[in-house]
Image (cartoon, rainbow, N blue to C red):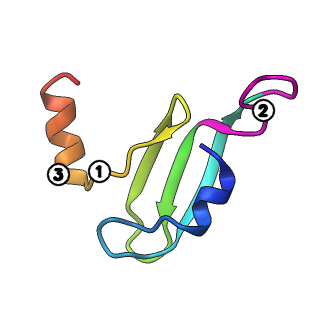
């Protein structure tokens, strides 16, 4: 996930501002250098959390995300 994406995305639940907690960033020299590979986006308004896996933020609302996990996806 490119960090400048934070300027245009919002919490899908309440439209609040999201803050980034990056766990892994692609290393210098990689094709996706500087991009967040794993981490969490947290809403500053409702405190909902959205995982980032493989560089892709999962911005599904919690109930849809839980249903997806239950279905084994």
Q: Which mark, residue 60?
A: 1
> For the magenta stretch, what is the residue range?
27-37
Could you tell whether 34 is left or right of 23 in the image?
Answer: right
Q: Main secondary structure of the magenta part?
A: loop
Q: Residue furthest front?
A: 31
Q: Nearer the viewer, mark 3 or mark 2?
A: 2
Could you say where residue 27 lies in the image, as x and y percent from the top left? Answer: 81, 27
Q: x, y (%) of residue 10?
A: 45, 68
Q: What's the CA distance linking mark 2 and mark 1?
A: 26 Å
Residue 50: x percent and y percent?
A: 42, 50
Which callout, 2 or 1, points at the residue further toward the start of the chain?
A: 2
* In the rendered image, the vertical position of residue 61 relative to residue 26, given as above or below: below
Q: Residue furthest right?
A: 28
Q: Is residue 71 magenta?
A: no
Q: Residue at x 69, y 39 (%)?
A: 35
Residue drawn at the location 49% of the way across and 64% of the way down:
9
User: Residue beneath label 2, please?
Assistant: 33
Please name the residue shown 87% across and 23% down the image.
29
Compared with 70, 50 (above or below) is below
**Residue on which the image places disc 3:** 63
Element on which disc 3 rests: helix
Q: Which mark is residue 32?
A: none
Does the magenta segment cover residue 31? yes
The residue tagged with tag 1: helix, strand or loop?
loop
Q: Which quadrant: the N terminus?
A: top right
């Amino acid at each position: 996930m490119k960090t400048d994406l934070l300027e245009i995305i919002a919490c899908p639940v309440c439209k609040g501002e999201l803050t980034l907690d990056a766990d892994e960033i692609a290393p210098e020299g990689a094709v996706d250098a500087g991009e967040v590979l794993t981490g969490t986006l947290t809403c500053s308004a409702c405190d909902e959390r959205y995982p980032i896996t493989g560089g892709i933020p999962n911005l599904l609302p919690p109930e849809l995300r839980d249903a997806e996990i239950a279905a084994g996806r």
